[in-house]
Image (cartoon, rainbow, N blue to C red):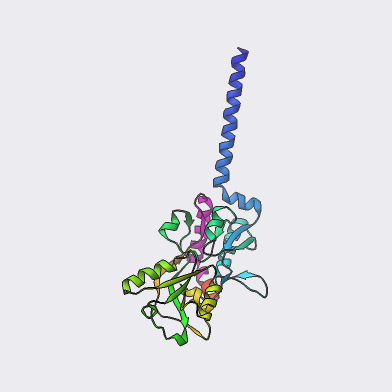
Amino acid sequence: MKFKKSILTVLMSSVLLMSGCSSGGDSSSTDEIQKIKDRGVLRIGTKVDVPKFGYKDPATNEVDGLEIDIARAIAKKILGDESKIETQAVAAKTRGPLLDNGEVDLVIATFTITEERKESYNFSDAYFTDGVALLVKKDDGYNTLKDLDGKTIGVSQSSTTKDSLLKEAESLGITLKFSEYATYPEIKAALDSGRVDCFSVDSAILTGYLDDSTVILDDRYNPQEYGIASKKSNESLAKVVNEVVNEMKESGELDKLIEKWEIR
């Protein structure tokens, strides 16, 4: 009898232990909001080379822009304090991996929503819509994408720009070459030095690199909707983020911020 009772006790203890482990695993994977509250800071992956969206001022080393303001609104919703954000610089190639390995909670970095990307990440509703555009030197005489037949376009690594232009080029019956770079300043430097004939990315981003020697052509390609990305498993966080985005839209706050940053 004692032997049977001992076995029963061991089995019950094992079940309780397994149950406890399972419960802890579920909590750690789903309650991302509580993790952020316990940490006391919201970690944001943001661009630092996109004026008006996410840009690091070399004079102050401060990062600011529309996307930083949106991050502050989310921090206020979750932590009650808009200053409780921690930013980490991301590029088109690194923003996904930084989410995957948990180094950032959210990516707010001119991240275009696509069906393919939605298979890997949660995306909020769009907070800004733009289109792919072309920045060229004024003296080169280019007026349309067709004028760039056989020319080299500078684009960002892992961005949607290249695919957008390839589709348009196919419809026009022209051929384009591409050079991919890690950052936007590198593409602008390549344009200035003549290593590429055009710098292409979304129009609002290009305005930050416009100067007296360059011009943005009129045409726009493939509308780009920017969303806030979180890990696929973090549904509770994604829900709160989407609530903030839609509250900002409905209240008119988002429009005011876009006007504040003079984004066109």
Q: Position of residue 70 (x, y in %)?
A: 55, 65
Q: Is residue 235 part of the magenta span, yes or no?
A: yes
Q: Residue at x 46, y 75 (%)?
A: 203
Q: Can the viewer see residue 256?
A: no
Residue 46 placement (x, y as % from top left): 57, 64
Instruction: State the predominant SS element of the stretch in magenta.
Output: helix
Tell me where residue 79 appears, x and y as whole percent: 62, 56
Quadrant in the picture for the N terminus: top right
Residue 237 visible somewhere in the drawing = yes
Look at the image and say whether residue 207 sits in the magenta stretch.
no
Q: Residue furthest bottom?
A: 139
Q: Is residue 202 left or right of residue 54?
A: left
| Horizontal arrangement in the rendering, residue 263 relative to residue 151 (left or right) | right
Say which residue appears at 61% left-offset and 58% top-offset: 43
Instruction: Report which quarter residue 48 is drawn in.
Output: bottom right
Q: Which residues are magenta?
A: 228-254
Q: Residue 221 at what x, y percent from top left?
A: 39, 72
Q: Is residue 112 above or below residue 147?
A: above
Q: Is residue 244 above or below residue 253?
A: above
| Depth check, front residue: 216 or 188 | 188
In the rendered image, the residue lying farthest to the top is: 1
Question: Which residue sits at x=45%, y=62%?
Answer: 113
Front one among 245 and 132: 132
How many marks overall? Answer: 0
